Amino acid sequence: MKIVGFLCNWCSYAGADLAGISRLQYPADIRIIRVPCSGRVNPMLILKCFQKGIDGVLVSGCHPGDCHYQEGNYYTRRRMLMLRSLLDYFGIDRRRFHVSWVSASEGVKWADVVKKVVEDVRAATEEGTRKVTGTEQIDHDRGN
Amino acid sequence: MIEEIKNIAGKLLKNGDIGLFIGYGRNSLGDVIPVFIQKEKDVKTLVWGSDCFYNLTTYLTDRDITRLQEGSIGILLKGCDQKALKVLISESQVRRERIKIIGVTCDGMKNPDGSILSKCETCDVHDPDPALCDAVIGGKSTKKEAKDDFADVAAVDALDSSARREHWNRYFKRCIRCYACRNVCPLCYCKECVLDEHNPQWVSPSPSADNNMFFHIIRAYHLTGRCIDCGECERVCPVGIPLRRINRKMIQAVRESFDFEAGKDQKTKSPLTWFRQEDPEDFF
């Protein structure tokens, strides 16, 4: 399974790092992309992941009020809420898209979040909800 | 009503208050078309009727028109079209002082077979907003305001995830990616659209059902909190994709989550550009 995680540099990435330093076990299905702020995560990036056949996406940032840039995650919250209802409306299983708040000190929470996400995505896959793409060949895709 | 429109438009053109008037006319087949009038003597070609459903605000951001036209522009707008104008003003795409607005009362637009358009049935702005208009024509609309219950959206929401996917796939399979929905949209004004970008290429232009779905997600997302449900996209779609059903989902979501409705005033921007600390986050 392939899951992409967009992690903000200041909280969630440090949280994931802490989980590693603390030698916490969590599934290795997640590929982490570090971004300066969860507000940097353009919903188009998430859509691109799904187009490329990724099974699930996780966006993680600082808790509301703790953003390094004061307010980036408040925008994220609105955007992701809307994106999720849109994806859901188009029949993309809601268990494939997750958002979480993980601070730099929450290594344990990070491990739990990943476990939960992987579980959800796996359940969605096993229940036979189709992959978001991959039902037909995408031709002429330049592979950006 | 039409005489009043001609009078006011003629006067504005004659006095040089505006250099161009955008209104409705008819082509040789008798169909309603948008007309662009620059001379006072041409105002006689203006028409008004129950088939003037175009949303003319699209042309206010059309660069071919705004570039040629240095002076002010006059435009004929229904109450619903004014919502689009308010969004454009709030996003600094149109300068209010550059346009003269003639607002016209609407009793609901009709299909060729005489039935009322579905968007008009749930419309709540049959009367133009006098605060926005330079002139208002027609008294109070005879059409009653109706409550919008979003039944079309609820019908899709009631399906389960894979059934929804099937529901949309049926439509997206036939999308030919002509982008008519984007081109006609009064709020899709970007000079360079992400859909035309090649590097990075956000979505492949080849028309497969999957690619088309992502195209429609992107289109709908970019209109989140901005779409005023003028229904032009659905009207121009050559393959009959029910695009309003998509847009209205987002209208409903924005209303429920952020208590916001696009086109209500010309100061508040799209809800994705501001926030409240107590915004919902129940799925995080």
Image (cartoon, helix red, strand yellow):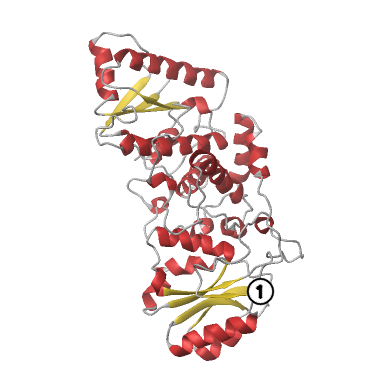
From the image, which quarter does the N terminus of chain B lie in? Answer: bottom right
**Does residue A116 appear anywhere in the picture?**
yes
From the image, which quarter does the C terminus of chain B lie in? Answer: top left
Q: Is residue A134 above or below residue B266?
A: above
Q: Nearest the camera: B110 or B143?
A: B143
Q: In x, y percent, where is residue B93?
A: 39, 63
Q: In x, y percent, where is residue B56?
A: 53, 68
Q: Is residue B174 above or below residue B8?
A: above
Q: Of the residues shown, which amino acid type is indicated by label 1?
A: Asp
Q: Residue at x 53, y 32 (%)?
A: A92
Q: Nearest the camera: B166 or B284?
A: B284
Q: In x, y percent, where is residue B155?
A: 68, 39
Mark 1 lies on residue: B31
> Disc count in the image?
1
Q: Residue at x 52, y 60 (%)?
A: B83
| Label 1: how many Cα within 10 Å (few below 14, some 14–19, many 20+) | few
Left or right? Give the position of A9 relative to B273.
left
**Does residue B173 appear anywhere in the picture?**
no
Left or right? Give the position of A2 relative to B163.
left
Q: Is residue B131 above or below residue B9?
A: above
Q: In x, y percent, where is residue A143?
A: 36, 39
Quarter occupied by residue B6: bottom right
Q: Is residue A39 above or below residue B20?
A: above
Quarter occupied by residue A50: top left
Q: Residue at x 36, y 79 (%)?
A: B70
The chain to which mark 1 is attached is B
For mark 1, give the secondary structure.
loop
Q: Nearest the camera: A31 or B281?
A: B281
